[in-house]
Image (spheres, rainbow, N blue to C red):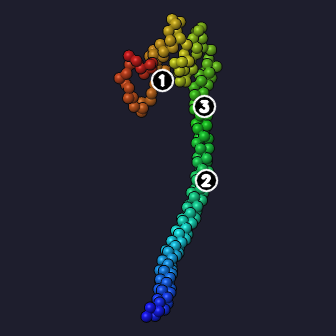
Amino acid sequence: MKRRHTRLLAPSLALAVALSGATGAAIGYLHFERIAGNERLAAERAERANAELQDALSRMRDQLAAAQLRIDALSGQLAAAQEEQMRAADEIQQQLAAYHGAPARRTIAARGKSAPAPKAQGSPVVLAGNPPAASQQPAPATGSLPMAVASSPVKNFTAPGSTPSYFSGESTPFLGTGKQ
C-alpha cells in the first residue's frame, strides 16, 4: 500500500501545486483588473477635468479680449475727454486773461483821453483790476514785511447788491499768517 500512496501522492501534489498556481493567478488577475479599472476611471476623470479647464481657459481668454477692447475704447474716450478738458481750460484762461486785461485797457484808454495821471515816485501804479498779491506789493519804507501792506484795510472792490455778504461784520480782510 505504500506504493499506492506514493503513486497518489505525486499526482495529488502536482494537482495541489497546479490549483494553487491557478488560484494565485486568478487572484492576481482580479486584483490587477481592479487596479487597471481604477486607473482607467482616474484617466477619464483627468481627461474631463482637463477639458473643463481648457473650456474655462478659453472663456477667460474671451473675457480678457472683451475687457481689453473695453479698456481700449475707454482709453480713447478718456484721451478725448482730457483733450477737451485741456481745450476748455485754455479757453477759460484766455477769457480770464482778457477779463483781467479789460480794466487795464479801460483805465489806459480813459487816461489817454484826459491828462496823464501823476505818478508818485517809489509807489507802483495799481490799475483798476485785482490788487497785486501781498508778495508782489512793495514793502513800506519802514522796512517791515510785505504782510504789513497786505493787512491794511484796502477796499478797491464793491460787491454787487445781489451778492450775499457772509462776512459783513468783519472789519478787515483775512490776510496774514493766521496767528494771533
Residue underneath mark 1: 157
Q: Furthest residue to the top?
A: 142
Q: Quick one: 110 or 133, which is closer to the camera? A: 133
User: Crowding at label 2, few (<14), some or many (≥20) Cα neighbours within 10 Å?
Assistant: few
Q: At label 3, which amino acid type do we have?
A: Ala
Q: Position of residue 116 (x, y in %)?
A: 62, 14
Residue underneath mark 2: 72
Q: Furthest residue to the left?
A: 169
Q: Label 2: state its secondary structure.
A: helix
Q: Nearer the viewer, mark 1 or mark 2?
A: 2
Residue drawn at 51 percent across, 5 percent down: 142
Residue drawn at 41 percent across, 20 percent down: 178
Quadrant position of residue 61: bottom right
User: Crowding at label 3, few (<14), some or many (≥20) Cα neighbours within 10 Å?
Assistant: few
Q: Is 76 rendered above or below residue 94?
A: below
Q: Label 3: state its secondary structure.
A: helix
- Of the numbered discs 1 and 2, the one sitting upstream in the chain is 2
Q: At label 2, which amino acid type do we have?
A: Asp
Q: Label 1: state its secondary structure.
A: loop
Q: Position of residue 111 (x, y in %)?
A: 61, 19
Q: Quick one: 61 or 7, which is closer to the camera? A: 7
User: As drawn, is 151 to the left or to the right of 169?
Assistant: right
Residue underneath mark 3: 98
Residue drawn at 61 percent across, 34 percent down: 94
Q: Quadrant of the C terminus?
A: top left
Q: At label 1, which amino acid type do we have?
A: Phe
Q: Nearer the viewer, mark 3 or mark 2?
A: 2
User: Crowding at label 1, few (<14), some or many (≥20) Cα neighbours within 10 Å?
Assistant: few
